[in-house]
Image (cartoon, rainbow, N blue to C red):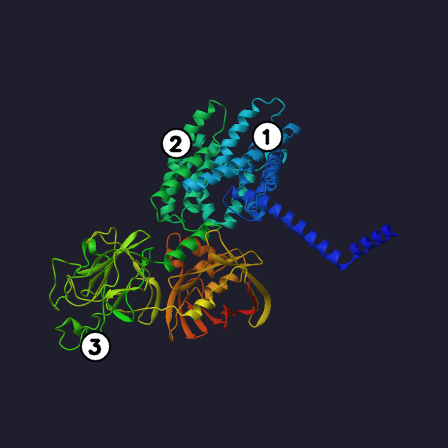
């Protein structure tokens, strides 16, 4: 009786709605795991040529199966590596990038190029795939931590050499002829140069056949015109140089190792450097070096019967990338995009949007002052002291004083509070020098009464010409931005009361000055996040307005849901959740996998960049690329975006290709203004590739953005849930 009841209860539970939901959940989980696994497989193929996505991976995988042994061994190696990675607990989302598994893939492809499929081969390929995974993870960690370098395909080269030498000891491993099928042998004859290019391109995947090369070339052209152009120019440059050195163009064209030149051109010219004329020149120099490395490697390794593989590419590319990073070459991108075009967009956008440098200062006073002298000023800001600013207060008539101006006290700025422009420690104070009478200067004590602050970012800030005995801080004291350190005076080489500020390399008085910029100020009714105000301009430090600061304070796991309307017709729903990247940057992530990075800096809220294919995320950046965390009626500010953010299709491809050589062609200027406390209007100027774009952002009373309007599209917030 009890047993029957138990069986009956079990049967009821297995047929109820709860079980159906659990079964659907398990099925969904299994489906998700399979999709993740397949994505990892295909991403590994795409990573070989610095691409990402399922479509390139499928095309490249199909190309390897033109030689079945190659395709099967490559797939076997990557599956073995993936299974082992999951066994030891590697994160599935990390594996899905293909970063760790493309080296095992290459080893499998390489072994398949000369081994027949036998049980012994299956074991050997699987073992080498797992070993290559371990070597890849270890090498990538060491290179990233200590050298700030990518591992590239160096693990493949090392492990392939080990595998190649090991096969000489194993008689049970059957060698394969590696010949293609009859239908491939009857492939139409192509011009020699084209045939050599396509075969070399296919040789990257160990299928040196024009059909494989054509598939790879087509995918490169489809995903990135820059990558395709670099592959062609890299091949042409390398073969031409080797023809000169070898004295035979036929010999140079016949050598399929020319794929090293393509990979070097792609890596140096467009992946690890921002695509530009300069990056192309650097890539050409790298290829010239690689011609020597390739032949030296070939001669040396031929003693052991080992091919050069991608060793020339790795040695040259890593050497150039490391050196360029070491000298802080301007073309090294801060953020790598999914394609060179995206990297170029991000780089140009960053250059335009953040023209200042890391030596950022707040204005050293309160209220509105006038720039009296700036960088390279006509009087005292010359030579080693060229990077400095002087500020005074003027009245509506442009005068700096009232009355006769014969006494320091006649000047509007005399004994006004002077504040610290940075966070740091006071390292020097001079406070006992007398104030000059207007028109007179102290040429012995040029800087007069001063405060010198050491900023932990690696520089010193000097504030000079304080009034006698007015300095309120002491040496060794810590100060924060906005801390009052003294009163404006007229001591030192100063003909009238003013505030002098400079950044210098050491704490010695009169040290060489360094460039800097001011942050979060209003000049002539325009808000500036960072910049160097013009001489005679009125400047006011922008006070952070707590309501705007709170409105843009998004927390981890917050969820925002928007209805997407096109011409007032509901077309989609956008669900965003807040996450944090490894570098600490917050981002909104959509259910489609797109990301919109945002953050606050220098009194400003920014939408930094978008990633992924979600079509709605760019609308936020188009409508509100930046927002001052302050407010005043009709306050204006400007920003710049790369044209790739607002264009699509052929116009986008054209502008991205041209912007390598003429960057300004891709620049879209934005003008923004507060309409009222709750609304910001934005206008993106017209360009050669798109008309003007009008947008409006309406803030919620409590948190975030209630409505985003860009042209015919509207994002209307449906709900907001705190994490």
Q: Name the residue under label 2.
A: 292
> Which marked residue is nearer to the observer: mark 1 or mark 3?
3
Q: Mark 1 points at which residue?
A: 178
Residue 373 in picture, x, y percent from top left: 21, 64
Q: Give the SS element for disc 2.
A: helix
Q: Are marks 3 and 2 in contact (CB under 8 Å)?
A: no
| Image side of residue 596 versus residue 282, left or right | right
User: Which of the 4 image quadrants contains residue 170?
Assistant: top right
Q: Name the residue under label 3.
A: 397
Give the Cα distance between marks 1 and 3. 88 Å
Work out whether 547 lies above or below 62: below
Viewer-side residue, 419 vs 380: 419
| 3 or 2: tag closer to the N-terminus | 2
Give the Cα distance between marks 2 and 1. 29 Å
Work out whether 122 lies above or below 83: above
Q: Do the residues labelled 1 and 3 touch (CB within 8 Å)?
A: no
| Image side of residue 590 versus residue 433, left or right | right
Residue 577 in picture, x, y percent from top left: 55, 60
Viewer-side residue, 445 vs 709: 445
Q: In which quarter of the image is the C terminus?
A: bottom right
Q: Give the SS element for disc 1.
A: loop
| 1 or 3: tag closer to the N-terminus | 1
């Amino acid at each position: 009786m009890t047993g029957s009841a138990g069986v009956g209860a079990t049967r009821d539970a297995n047929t109820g709605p709860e079980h159906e939901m659990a079964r659907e959940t398990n099925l969904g989980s299994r489906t998700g795991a399979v999709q993740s696994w397949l994505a990892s497989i295909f991403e590994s193929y795409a990573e070989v040529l610095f691409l990402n996505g399922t479509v390139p991976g499928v095309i490249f995988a199909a190309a390897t199966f033109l030689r079945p042994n190659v395709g099967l061994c490559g797939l076997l190696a990557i599956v073995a590596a993936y299974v082992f990675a999951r066994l030891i607990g590697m994160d599935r989302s990390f594996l899905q990038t293909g970063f760790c598994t493309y080296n095992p893939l290459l080893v499998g492809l390489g072994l398949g190029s000369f081994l027949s499929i036998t049980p012994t081969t299956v074991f050997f390929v699987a073992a080498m795939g797992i070993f290559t995974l371990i070597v890849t993870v270890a090498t990538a960690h060491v290179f990233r931590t200590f050298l700030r370098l990518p591992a590239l395909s160096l693990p493949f080269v090392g492990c392939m050499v080990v595998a190649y030498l090991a096969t000489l000891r194993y008689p049970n491993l059957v060698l394969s002829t590696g010949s293609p099928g009859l239908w491939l042998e009857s492939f139409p004859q192509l011009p020699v140069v084209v045939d050599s290019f396509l075969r070399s391109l296919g040789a990257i995947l160990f299928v040196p056949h024009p059909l494989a090369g054509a598939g790879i070339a087509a995918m490169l052209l489809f995903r990135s015109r820059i990558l395709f152009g670099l592959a062609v120019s890299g091949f042409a440059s390398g073969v031409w140089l080797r023809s000169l050195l070898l004295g035979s163009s036929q010999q140079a064209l016949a050598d399929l190792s020319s794929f090293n030149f393509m990979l070097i051109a792609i890596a140096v010219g467009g992946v690890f450097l921002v695509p530009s004329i300069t990056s192309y020149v650097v890539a050409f120099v790298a290829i010239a070096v690689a011609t020597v490395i390739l032949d030296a490697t070939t001669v040396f390794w031929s003693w052991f019967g080992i091919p050069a593989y991608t060793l020339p590419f790795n040695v040259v590319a890593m050497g150039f990338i490391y050196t360029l990073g070491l000298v802080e070459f301007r073309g090294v991108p801060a953020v790598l995009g999914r394609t060179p075009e995206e990297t170029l967009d991000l780089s140009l956008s960053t250059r335009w949007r953040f023209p200042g440098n890391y030596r950022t200062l707040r204005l050293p006073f309160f209220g509105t002052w006038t720039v009296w002298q700036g960088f390279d000023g006509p009087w005292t800001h010359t030579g080693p002291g060229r990077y400095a600013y002087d500020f005074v207060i003027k009245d509506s008539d442009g005068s700096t004083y009232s009355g006769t101006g014969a006494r320091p006290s006649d000047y509007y700025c005399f004994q006004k509070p002077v504040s610290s422009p940075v966070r740091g420690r006071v390292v020097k104070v001079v406070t006992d020098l007398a104030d000059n009478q207007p028109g007179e200067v102290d040429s012995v004590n040029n800087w007069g009464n001063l405060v010198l602050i050491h900023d932990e970012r690696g520089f010193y800030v000097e504030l000079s010409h304080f009034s006698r005995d007015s300095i309120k801080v002491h040496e060794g004291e810590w100060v924060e931005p906005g801390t009052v350190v003294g009163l404006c005076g007229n001591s030192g080489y100063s003909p009238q009361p003013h505030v002098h500020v400079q950044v210098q390399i050491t704490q010695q008085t009169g040290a060489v000055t360094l460039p800097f910029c001011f942050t979060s100020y209003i000049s002539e009714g325009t808000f500036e996040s960072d910049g160097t105000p013009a001489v005679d301009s009125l400047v006011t430090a922008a006070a952070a307005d707590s309501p705007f600061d709170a409105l843009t304070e998004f927390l981890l796991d917050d969820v925002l849901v928007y209805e997407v309307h096109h011409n007032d017709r509901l077309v989609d729903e956008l669900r965003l959740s807040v996450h944090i990247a490894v570098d600490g940057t917050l981002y909104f992530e959509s259910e489609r996998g797109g990301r919109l990075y945002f953050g606050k800096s220098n009194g400003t809220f920014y939408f930094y960049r978008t990633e992924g294919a979600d079509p709605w995320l760019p609308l936020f950046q188009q409508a509100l690329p930046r927002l001052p965390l302050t407010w005043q009626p009709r306050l204006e500010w400007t920003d710049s975006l790369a044209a790739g953010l607002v264009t699509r299709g052929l116009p986008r491809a054209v502008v991205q290709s041209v912007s390598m050589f003429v960057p300004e062609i891709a620049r879209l200027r934005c003008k923004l203004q507060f309409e009222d406390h709750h609304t910001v209007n934005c206008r993106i100027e017209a360009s050669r590739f798109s008309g003007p774009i009008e947008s409006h952002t309406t803030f919620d009373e409590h948190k975030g953005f209630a409505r985003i309007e860009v042209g015919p599209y509207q994002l209307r917030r449906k709900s907001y849930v705190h994490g």
